[in-house]
Image (cartoon, rainbow, N blue to C red):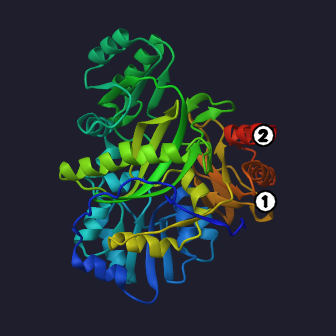
Amino acid sequence: MASQMAATAGASLQAAPARPAPRRRAAALAVHCAAGGKQNVLVVGSGGREHALAWKLAQSPTCGTLYVAPGNAGTQLEPSMVTLPQLNTSNHEQVISFCREKGIDFVMVGPEQPLVEGLVDSLSAAGITAFGPTAAAAQLEGSKAFMKNICRKYNIPTAQYETFTDPAAAKAFITQCGAPIVVKTSGLAAGKGVIVAQTLEEAYQAVDDMMLNNAFGEAGTTVVVEEFLTGEEASFFAFIDGENCIPLVGAQDHKAVGDGDTGPNTGGMGSYSPAPVLTPAIEQQAMEELIYPTARGMCAEGTPFRGVLFAGLMIENGRAKLLEHNVRFGDPECQSLMVRLQSDLLESLQAQCRGEQVKLEWSSDPSLTVVLAAKGYPGSYAKGGPIRNLEAVTGAKVFHAGTAMKDGQVVSAGGRVLGVTAVGKDVAEAQRKAYAAVDQIDFSDGFCRRDIGWRAVARLREGAGR
């Protein structure tokens, strides 16, 4: 795969360590994590992030039987894991019963919804080790209003904003501020509840769609209206355990559906890692001004965060502001990260559970992920389209997201369908390999952006031309 050269995450960061956080885990959880021998593992989720996490966890020499629930066609095709499409992960008692029946030692909760619903709380109360934040801490993603209020209270640089439950008041504020302006659902909306309105009329329509037309369900009963920030976006990740913060690595996601970053926002049309815009100085600033204050603020609020914290950054003039927090690995950024990770993921996550210092090593070679989506996404799209020739793909790893098996055939079952991920000696080679693999796949109902990684490739060419 990639070069065996490794870079230690955070080696260039000079931030002073956070105050040590007292151990608040139940002793039973530490016993689970510390148990010797093979560990049976359950990964909760069905997307490309969960396929990538399961794929990496299965590589650990201490991983016993690895289960994925509900999983997808990709996890079903992996010989190293068992997919459980019938396990209802919203039914916490059913998940607990399964873990006890199969002797599950460790649960990795991938998506935001079960975290917000308190699956980690339920598992922990049952004495089962689970990686991820409690429901109270998951409000950082589950409620944008909560997250923005944390930023305001603890002086975390972010866009100026106000929160509304009344459509008329939201529109009055929009009129006062002018356009462009950003309107967001406060609740979870699968990455699609953010409207960057270029005109007042677009902003008013966004308020109507969210608050009156129920376009995003309960997620839109409260909206956040905030100033439009300019610059370049990036994704930054850190392990958090109370006030202890360990930086991981960065990536850049492509949210817009069309080439050149045009069209409506999606859950992500592709990603690459590392992101050249995330310089060591900006990573340092992000840790000192965004990550540490968030962790300390959550402790001060009585809702300490434990898990992986995602910081969506807007970078301009060498400084970052916080766009949003997510309480889990990003998707598709996770796919790009997992192929670069050289450390044992299972061992690292279990050490994090025990409150131990975690040192992760990453390949220095860049990775790039191209998302194949169903035609019509992020709007309405058809499901059930056949996907052929996957077995012929070379030079890349195909992570499944919205797929299912039907009569032995892989078919589409969601908006974002596949994440084709490649590694190269530089980002241009990773891009070439990823698109060569995409072109080997027969998916007539699908489409993709053809410019994933364009900023990094442009920087690479500019550097070569000097």
Q: Position of residue 264 (x, y in %)?
A: 56, 29
Q: Residue furthest bottom?
A: 37
State the residue position of label 2: 461
Nearer to us: label 1 or label 2 = 2
State the residue position of label 1: 389
Q: Toward which corner of the image does residue 128 lie, by quadrant?
A: bottom left
Kind of residue at badge 1: Asn
Q: Position of residue 163 (x, y in %)?
A: 28, 27
Per the rendering, the mark at residue 249 is: none
Callout 1 environment at 10 Å: few (<14), some (14 to 19), or many (20+)? few
Separation of marks 1 and 2 at Cα, in angstroms:
33 Å
Residue drawn at point x = 64 percent, y = 53 percent:
419
372 vs 191, left or right, is: right
Helix, strand or loop at mark 1: loop
Kind of residue at badge 2: Arg
Q: Is residue 346 visible?
A: yes
